[in-house]
Image (cartoon, coloured by chain):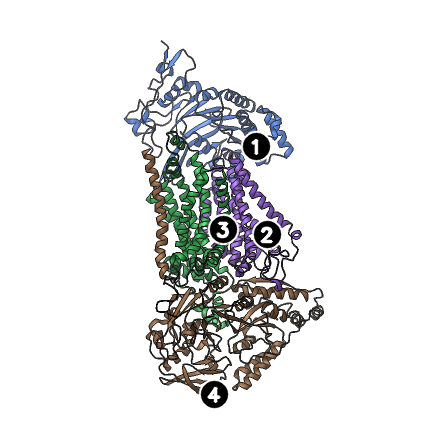
Chain colours: A green, B brown, C purple, D blue
Amino acid sequence: MGSYVLKRFLSAVPTVIGVFVVVFFVIRMIPGDPAVSMLGSGATEAQIQVYRVKYGLDAPLPVQFGIAFRNFLTGDLGDSISLYKPVREAIMERLPGTVQLAGLGVVAGGILAVFLGVAAAVFRGKWPDLLLTSLSSLGMSLPTFYIGLWVLMIFARKLGVIPVLSNARGVSYWQSMFGPLLTMVVGETSLLTRTTRSSMLEIFNEDFIRTARAKGLPEKWVMFRHALGNAMIPIITVTGYNLATAFGGAIVLEAVFTRNGIGSLLIGAINARDYPLIQGAAVVIAMLMILVNIMTDIIYGFADPRIRVSGE
Amino acid sequence: MQRQNKKINKLLGFLAVFAVLGLALSGCGGNSAESGGNAPVSADAAPGGEKVLRVARDWEDTSWDPVTFTGAAQLALTPQIFETLCKLETDGSSSPLLAESWEMSPDGLAYTFHLRRGAQFHQGYGEMTSEDVKFSFERNLDPDTGSIHAETLNLSNVTSIETPDPYTVVFNLASPDVDFITRCSQYSSIIVSRAAFDAIGLEGFASTPVGTGPFAYDGGTPGVKTEAVRFADYWGAAPKLDRIVYTIITDSNVIYSAFENGELDVIFVYYQDKVNEYEAQGYSINYIPSDQLLYVGLNAQLDPWTDMKVREAFFHAVDPQYFLDELFYGNETFPGGYIPPISKYALTDYLKPGYDPARAKALLAEAGYPDGVDVTLWCVNDELSTAPSLIVQSQLKESGFNVELQMVDFGVFIDQVRGGTAGMWLLYNSTPPLADDTINRYTSDFYPGSNWVGVTDPVYDALVAEGLDASTEEEKTAAFEEAQRYFLDLKALYPISTYGYHFITQPNVTGAKLWGDLALHLNEADVG
Amino acid sequence: MRTLLSNKFIMLGGAMILAMLLIALFAPLLTVYPYDGLDLANKNQAPSLEHMMGTDPYGRDVWCRVVYGSRVSLMVSFAAVGVAVVCGSVLGIVSGYLKGGFDLAAGRLIDIMMAFPSLLLSMIIGVALGPSTRNMCLSIGIPLIPIFYRVARGAALSVGERTFVIASESMGSGRFRTMFRHVLPNVLPQIFVVLSMGMGGSILAEASLGFLGLGIPQPTPSWGLIVNEGKPYMFTAPWTTGFSGAFIALTIWGFNLLGDGLRDHLDPRV
Amino acid sequence: MADNDYLIRLEGLTKTFSINSSRGFRSARLTAVNDVSFDIRRGEVFGLVGESGCGKSTLYKAALRLIEASSGSVYYQGRNLYEMSFRELMKVRREMQVVFQDPYDSLNPRMTLEELAAEPLRIHKYGGRARRLARTEELFAAVGLPVQLIKGYPHQLSGGQRQRLCIARALSLSPEFIVCDEAVSALDVSIQAQILNLLLDLKEQMGLTYLFISHNLSVVRFVSDRIGVMYFGRLVELAGKDELFDHILHPYTYALLSAVPEPDPGWIRKYAVLQGSVPSMLRPQAGCVFHSRCPHGDRLCTQTPPELRDFGGGHYAACHKAGELNLSLDTGCLAEKG
């Protein structure tokens, strides 16, 4: 098992390097010069030149790439142009916000979805199933920002339960998390309910369920110990991959709920053409996504010996 | 049956591990997020009735080093922390601030400042002396500070800065500079502490401001939130507020709902209808005559604008009155010149709106475009520029200009205009209180970097040079006005309207004052 | 039982999509006011008899904007998914069939694409290429490629083992001819199922990019843009964002339902 | 046997696969075909038998160069396939066709029967549409398929009819050499006989040469002129059909042939059940591959691998003790019923 994990991490190294190289060149295709973006439309030619020299932007592209790549390999992500501080520090400040939002959202959504999924599977074909299935596919269709805006409107403006500014003073941690969490849970639950339902249905046709019932076990026991136990594997896998895509959703959520996670950091960096910060943030997000995928594969491997042996 | 249970326990165990992992991630995130700025302090007014003013803005300079400040209008917290030698009044005159008094030598080549005694720097960096003033000006010349103010301060004209005693500074100039005092009251001439620089260096200056102002920096995350607390040993009248909290919110929509929810005290509003709405609801409205102008520029080097007739036709195709009535509800005026009225030397009544679509069509026909001409209008894709560009598009259509809109990201827009490839563009142009730079930028040697209109006219260059070298204010004013008249006759830039915005405060907020540098100073502000 | 349920989804989803297509097609007939232009005098008016869905911040009728917006949004989404399907399937089939070096290289490229959240990749590509309707197809399409790549590769791997493919090779058919004549036709049904999911994702991406202000530029009306225009007045004039958001959600819902129905129908296991 | 009247000659053909196990990074090597050499004469039916998994299929794929052999060469009408360029190989492939085992899986479900039959013609650009159609109808007749089915789809045919279509497809370019890989194993017995007779008739009419691969000994006995026996990737015995059944030289062949059920109820057959374990492919043993299961094995067998020696009359065997053992089927294991 150990070597399987090692192999997965080693195979992730070229991907991360690939991400760095791709981001480095693609963002330099973006028209607009970081110096000008920072100095505004009134900047004179001389001012811009001073700025470019200071951040090594005037060096030919391959030279810039050589320097950036060597630093990257030694773990130094360089200094942010717009935030005047090391990129690593800027990212580490904002990372917990996004990770905790994505983590909590997916886990809470997952737990809720397991129950809804089981209910939909049990009442297959009857009205609860139709209702839950349609609602969940509606939940998947609503754009994240749309749900977010309405949550903000209802809970912050009309009910005043939570503050509009989640990072204002005197706002408790849970108050600031309520809005984005609720929005995320709506999305995540819809995704997972359908997975739970289909994997439960699949399990129902298995023989060992019929034998369990034949032995006269109480229905509840059959449902939770046998059916759900085996249905957990696909559920865990989808939960893992949802965690990876949840980072994408966080970008939009942070714009709606003024949460200062890595998503809003990245949007600001793109507008300011802050090359080092964009590279740093993109690479960190990529590493997070890969880490989550590997963790999910490992848990998937543990949970289902068949997969581990064949070492797909 | 036994084996079955073991398997399921293992699986449920994994789910538990996964859940705990998720929570742990968020848990550990939880406490660091707490320290990261949204500290769960209890009720808003801290214990002991501390007076807190909560200001919000949609953008800020993210470095505190004065050498990087680019414009007066955007300053919000900086004016409370930093100070300059002189204070620029709204009528354009300068009054004493860090300098108690000053005098100019008869030949105008030497200015002597007598500094205030006992002005302390924040964070215990001691009293401000002439050494600090000399350092603050000369550091702009040092290349690795990356300062962009050498030009605006006209430092090339300063031959030397002497400090005969700790409280006297003498500036020797190569040639007389009529506006030297005004330059010393601008954000580009902020006085910083030499001792602080020796201690924390450039990086330190970027992350922690050390000034002499009424409020001192008290931590925060750039681009997110910053706080300033009352400076106990401020030299001047002690401020009434205990603390200012200054938050960056990019989504204007969120700023409004937070303000209406009572979570913010002072906000800046750019939309006139929103201002009217707040006025109706009894909030106090304060107009800031901004140093910005809404204008449409034409690149005289690109077709079809090379032809004077076409440019003239354009001038007859735009109706500024529609903008003033429908977009700005009468709060703005037609500038009549390309320098904002509040700037010194601005020529404000030369250009007259001549909206006459028929005349425009006739001119186009004469210029060889009987059935209209296709042109492209470049503008920035922010909420501010959308409405005006649509108006320009629809108005020009009636005069035979079929306008294709190119609404692009700010970086792309700047690339186009600086590269000299944009034929026509719409922008809010900002001009510092001293109009020298703006007038100077349209001279030939600034083409195409800053001189986007492509005017390379020796007559205009000569007039501008004459103004810059003038030794008396009257000469400078005369030369600059002549230059502006000449430039406007070239019809390469159509100023549509002045552009100001408002800062709106909760009814219980008083004493927020606006100085000549168009920045909001909270020395006397109070939360009633 | 299963087919009835899945047919119901197919019918429901299909009906919604058909409605959207018809609206887009007969836009000129359904609209009274011009979708562009400017009428600041009556901006942000509540829905009334005159303006069924009220007016937007520039005084234009929201219903007309949304109807014309459906044209651009659907076209961009179809084009984006088109790009993704072609690239993803071709790469997937060649990887799955040829295996070896190509499979490794393509796999690595896809890994890199999947290392970005799709919205982030859309943002970076969108801003790099510059805002135009054509570039939007690429910036929304490229992040969808991995979805089709994985399905196509998986299918090509299994079809590649089938005897009639080996037979075709033994007859002297070149590898690319075999892929085109034998592997592709048998991979299409599985790609078709994922197609509707891709469409949903593409419309969602267009709307989200619009919301962040990085979507299709101002003059061309698209759903994402209308949402962005209505955003500043979200709480005082919610109908602009409300109705455009509803259209977006309905269309995505349609595609999701269609996708569910198809998967249940085609996939005997469930 | 004159040197050059063979149609196809295999010399030292070997094929090893590397399998990277999930355990770690060591990749194990599996030798599916180990140094096999034999000729197939023109117009002959060469039978190849062996347990499933002994490398029969891998051998024919390597022989036709559908997969690249690890070493050894294949001479087809005197020219080595492994020295040909890709283009030349494609041309030669016209003359070598394959009929596969599973009729349901060897026809692309999405192509009409006409397209399926005519595909080789299209690949090698054999004349226009009309000539192709004529040729297809001719083939349908040759294999006994009703011509009206031409527009139909594979799922409309029975197993036997599909196999007939496969044969038609194989014949479309009038090849010289056809490999039948378990061609009848998937069909029920009555249909098997029809297909076998069809194959033999076609051989006579068109002067074809077959490589007939199967694990079913009675079918191979019925069709073949000469039979080769494979075990564990090696050719252990090769002889004429009757010669092989009458004078068995290799113990494995004896065990294999003794397993053929005796049709005559009057006799009871004692089956030579093999003891010992099948060696693992991953760790090949020294010496004879069969020694672990061979009742007559001795020290010599465990050390040196036996060569394929000629015992006269075209009878070859790879066993140190070949000839010395009494392996006749009649005495060894047949006893009259009590």
Few, some or many residues within 10 Å of mark 2 (<14, 14–19, 20+): many
Residue sitting at the far left: D299
Task: For mark 1, name the chain.
Answer: D
Q: Is residue C254 visible?
A: yes
**Circle 2 sits on which residue?**
C70
In this figure, which residue is indicated by the disc labeled 4?
Answer: B108
Would you call the spot at circle 4 few (<14 residues within 10 Å), some (14-19), or many (20 or more)? some
The mark that comes first in sequence, 3 or 2, is 2
Chain under disc 2: C
Could you tell me the amino acid type at mark 2? Ser
Q: Which residue is mark 1?
A: D116
Looking at the rendered structure, the secondary structure element under dot 4 is loop
Residue B358 coordinates in the image, percent (x, y): 71, 69
Same chain for mark 1 and mark 3? The answer is: no
Could you tell me which secondary element the residue under label 1 belongs to? helix
In which quadrant of the rendered image does the N terminus of chain B lie? Answer: top left
Q: Secondary structure at mark 2?
A: helix
> Residue C19: x percent and y percent?
60, 46
Instruction: Say the numbered circle drawn on residue B16.
Output: none
Q: Which one is nearer the viewer's eye here, C24 or B239?
A: B239
Asked if marks 3 and 2 fall on the same chain, the answer is: yes
Residue A271 x/y as whole percent: 48, 62
Label 3: which residue?
Answer: C143
Number of the front mark, 3 or 2: 2
* Picture layout, residue A46 above or below residue C153: below
